[in-house]
Image (cartoon, helix red, strand yellow):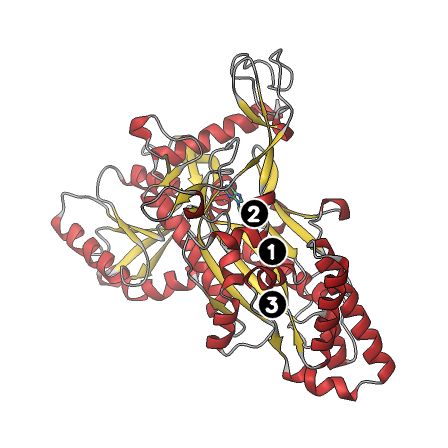
């Protein structure tokens, strides 16, 4: 029953998205392309607002994060170093009977194409063994189609940040701890794209790589490593923070971000990956999940990835990814010899573990780890990283699902009818304010309404609408999620007396309350409400 209701709700959302121009099937006129979606006029602005808010919050409003805009196609060795060439795959199963291909771990959720009443795992078609299927899209760079010219469309935006780490460090005058943010397209040849845009083959990511000192360096500099005292936001970053504090900080910062765009904490779930689920290099990963109508699913992952990524690139490209930390160099000689030994040994063990897991022969791993540990004593280390990684499309879908609601509103004759309304937070609503002349056949009203539109336009996204009865125009904007409506009527023209001249009604979408405000105050009132 609940499932049927959820399915019905999702159908309504998908249909609204198409009807109102949020999301269309890609290449629809040719029958569509599975796993690809286009954003229509309203969807484009919704996505743009989400990205802009993320960018401002993550970079512009901080001193310690800078931006990057790298290419989608990069040197294929990047994907070898990152592990994507060898391990970025899903287990795939073929049905020998209907030739359909499924992700092995999803067969119990996907209907059999030939017998939709049964799940793929239950139908009588014989299945192949599960085989790994690499999710990267391949392409060829240059005019010759050969193995050595194979390149990949990036499956994540993160790797470019590691590959450009040294350039950014040297040009931005940042010092660890600092972050590099990037947003842009990513491509994954998902075996079973589904749940509308939730799992697509082309999507956008917004990723931050926040580089921090290894705990051994923090301890050498500060004499201690702060760890979280309990749940919640740990406050302003401090020099003695170790990776756990930074990780918790970014989890909480990201939750605040969601709250600020209108997804309350109660709609999210924090899922701490279990030790056996973590990648071997990860120290902790928290998935932020959202309660979609089709289930509680991941919106974003916040991973403490140790120094794995930069270390991998260091090994593969042969160039040092270490930073020189003046504070560490100055602090080290002041440490008691026993403390020096302890920190050097801890760092040595951590590097040895990484190098051994990376496949270096035992002797070479020990030799390299010793060099790294000696480097630490002179102020050098490979930074560790905390990675909050979010998907724009999933975020937009979560916002649409959360915003969708139906209530009762009076029609033209005062009779209650069902109203579909997207209760977007004003910050991310595609249109902030709609401007309506009460009647379109009264030139004075139209003229004044256009003046109001032009007054507001430089400050907010405005939609001007003069077609149809005013109630219907409100309804259309409710469906688009427009938080405010401004109506220009005969009072505005001063027909009922000079005290109301140059005032308009300002209607609020959710409460449907209307107040009379001066045109001269509109910009200030609206920008304050939308901020
Ligand atoms: N750099 C780490 C990384 O890419 P991920 O968990 O694979 O981690 C991060 O992806 C986010 O990107 C996900 O939480 C999700 O929001 C988004 N994402 C991943 N695959 C996606 C897909 N096929 N369709 C839409 N969004 C996707």
**Quarter of the image that includes the N terminus:** top right
Q: CA distance from mark 2 to mark 3?
A: 21 Å
Q: CA distance from mark 3 to mark 1?
A: 20 Å
For label 1, the SS is helix
Q: Residues within 10 Å of mark 3 (few under 14, many from 20)?
A: many
Residue beneath the point at 79% across and 76% down? 224
Q: Is residue 107 left or right of residue 196?
A: right
Q: Which residue is mark 1?
A: 255
Farthest left residue in view: 443
Residue 314 image offset from top left, x and y in percent? 59, 64
Residue 509 image offset from top left, x and y in percent? 41, 47
Q: Nearer the viewer, residue 169 or 57?
A: 169
Residue 317 image offset from top left, x and y in percent? 54, 62
Residue beneath the point at 23% across and 46% down? 438
- Residue 515 appears in view: yes
* Residue 211 disc label: 3
The image quadrant of residue 90 is: top right
Q: Is residue 367 left or right of residue 424?
A: right
Q: CA distance from mark 2 to mark 1?
A: 29 Å
Label 3 C-beta lies within 8 Å of the nearest ligand 1 atom = no
Q: Residues within 10 Å of mark 2 (few under 14, many from 20)?
A: some
**Quarter of the image that includes the C terminus:** bottom left
Q: Which residue is mark 2?
A: 84
Q: Earlier in the sequence, mark 2 or mark 1?
A: 2
For label 2, the SS is helix
Q: How many numbered circles are shown?
A: 3
């Amino acid at each position: 029953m609940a499932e049927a209701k959820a399915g019905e709700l999702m159908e309504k959302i998908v249909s609204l998205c198409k009807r109102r121009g949020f999301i269309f099937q890609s290449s629809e006129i040719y029958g569509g392309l599975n796993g690809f979606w286009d954003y229509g006029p309203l969807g484009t602005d919704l996505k743009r607002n989400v990205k802009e808010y993320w960018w401002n919050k993550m970079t512009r409003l901080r001193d310690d994060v800078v931006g990057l805009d790298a290419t989608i196609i990069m040197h294929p060795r990047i994907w070898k170093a990152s592990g994507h060439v060898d391990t970025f795959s899903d287990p795939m199963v073929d049905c020998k009977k209907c030739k359909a291909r499924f992700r092995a771990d999803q067969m119990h959720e996907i209907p059999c194409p030939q017998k939709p009443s049964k799940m793929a795992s239950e139908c009588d078609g014989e299945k192949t063994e599960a085989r790994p299927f690499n999710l990267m899209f391949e392409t060829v760079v240059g005019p010759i189609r050969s193995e050595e010219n194979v390149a990949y469309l990036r499956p994540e935006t993160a790797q470019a940040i590691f590959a450009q780490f040294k350039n950014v460090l040297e040009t931005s005058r940042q010092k660890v701890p600092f972050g590099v943010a990037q947003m842009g397209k990513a491509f994954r040849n998902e075996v079973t794209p589904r749940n509308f845009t939730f799992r697509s083959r082309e999507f956008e990511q917004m990723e931050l790589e926040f580089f921090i000192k290894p705990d051994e360096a923090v301890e050498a500099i500060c004499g201690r490593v702060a760890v979280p005292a309990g749940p919640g936001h740990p406050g302003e970053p401090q020099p003695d923070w170790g990776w756990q504090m930074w990780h918790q900080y970014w989890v909480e910062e990201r939750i605040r971000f969601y709250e600020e765009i209108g997804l309350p904490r109660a709609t999210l779930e924090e899922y701490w990956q279990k030790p056996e689920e973590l990648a071997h290099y990860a120290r902790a990963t928290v998935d932020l999940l959202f309660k979609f109508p089709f289930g509680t699913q991941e919106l974003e992952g916040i991973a403490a990835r140790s120094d794995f990524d930069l270390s991998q690139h260091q090994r593969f490209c042969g160039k040092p990814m270490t930073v020189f930390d003046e504070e560490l160099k100055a602090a080290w000689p002041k440490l008691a010899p026993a403390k020096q030994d302890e920190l050097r040994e801890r760092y040595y063990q951590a590097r040895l573990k990484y190098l051994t897991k990376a496949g270096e022969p035992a002797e070479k791993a020990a030799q390299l780890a010793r060099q790294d540990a000696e480097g630490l004593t002179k102020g050098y280390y490979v930074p560790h990283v905390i990675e909050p990684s979010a998907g724009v499309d999933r975020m937009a879908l979560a916002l649409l699902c959360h915003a969708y609601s139906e209530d009762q509103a009076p029609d033209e004759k005062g009779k209650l009818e069902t109203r579909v309304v997207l209760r977007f937070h004003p910050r991310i609503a595609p249109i902030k304010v709609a401007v309506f002349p009460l009647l379109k056949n009264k030139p004075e009203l139209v003229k004044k309404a256009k003046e109001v539109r032009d007054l507001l336009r430089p400050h907010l996204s405005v939609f001007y609408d003069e077609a149809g009865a005013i109630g219907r125009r409100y309804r259309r904007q409710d469906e688009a999620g427009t938080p405010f409506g401004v109506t220009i009527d005969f009072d505005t023209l001063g027909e009922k007396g000079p005290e109301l001249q140059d005032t308009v009604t300002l209607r609020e979408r959710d409460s449907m309350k209307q107040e009379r405000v001066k045109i001269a105050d509109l910009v200030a009132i609206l920008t304050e409400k939308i901020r």
